[in-house]
Amino acid sequence: MTLTSVQNSVLSIIGVQGALTSRRVIADYGPRPLWHPLLTQGLLREYQTIYGPVVGLTDAGRQHQQHLNCPYIASPSTAADRAYLNDALSVVVGADYEIEAHDYQQAGGKRRHQLLAAGQPPTTSVIIRTTLRVPERVADNIYRDTHQRVERLHYIGGSYAPAQLGYPYLYASIRGGGINLSALKRLYKRHSLDTATWHHPLLLAVPDLQVLQLYIRSLEVNRWPMKSQRPWPVGFPPVRLIHLPLPRRR
């Protein structure tokens, strides 16, 4: 089948990124009629999700784009999760962070044995978290505080890899309604020592800010009740939120 340049671009970007919201495809590649034939021809599928309409590859689409080694995203929940992550990555990349590595969900059971037998990593296409390198302006602030330079990343991902100065984690998931207060508390407990090593807040993409901001403020107050006690001229908050709200229901 013959595709237009716009259709080829849409198919390729969704193949590489796994899934995107329909509204983002429209914003980046133009009105729906320009790429809608990819849906009618069975190369793309549109899922109705908590995060609004989300577009991902079908099996035929993956076959068409097999040279790209596309991630396997094939359910509404995993498509919505990947689209949410991609929106969060767009925000941080727009703020000059660099994507260094993704940590993937471990495969289980028979699939795990198959992957190991084939000499492949025993993981699914579900991204658990992303390691980012801070922008140069943030690296300069880190140096002001610590008198240490942000060096090259010493490892490429991995759940048990050590934290490193200037390389914070980003968590972005809309599964189950997104990161709520209990999830924030759990993630911060897991990474509170890492934030000191990163000299940077934990990054979380969330659909609702209000309750979470109050809790983060309490963390800040408990850490340094008085600003004069803070040991750095610049410093950093314990957690930084990226607000990606759910679309309004009509």
Image (cartoon, rainbow, N blue to C red):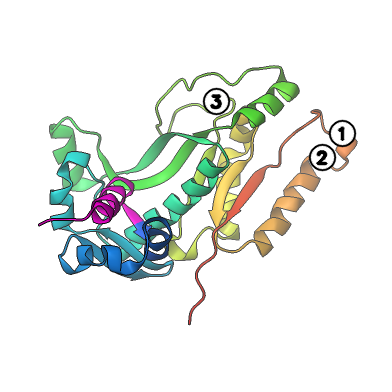
Q: Work out whether residue 196 can be spotted.
A: no
* Residue ID for mark 2: 224
> Could you give the CA–CA distance between mark 2 and mark 1, rounded to whole angstroms?
6 Å
Q: Residue at x 9, y 57 (%)?
A: 1
Assign a secondary structure to mark 1.
Answer: helix
Q: Residue at x 76, y 52 (%)?
A: 218
Q: Which residues are magenta?
A: 1-19
Q: Is residue 181 above or below residue 145?
A: below
* Residue ID for mark 1: 229
Magenta residues, dominant SS class: helix
Residue 7 lies in the magenta-colored region: yes
Assign a secondary structure to mark 3.
Answer: loop
Q: Amino acid at mark 3?
A: Gln
Answer yes or no: do the residues labelled 2 and 1 have beta carbons within 8 Å?
yes
Q: Is residue 197 above or below residue 174?
A: above
Query: Does label 3 or label 1 sit earlier along the sequence?
Result: 3
Q: Residues within 10 Å of mark 1 (few under 14, many from 20)?
A: few
Q: Residues within 10 Å of mark 2 (few under 14, many from 20)?
A: few
Using the image as rendered, state which of residue 204 and residue 100 is in the foreground.
100
* Residue ID for mark 3: 164
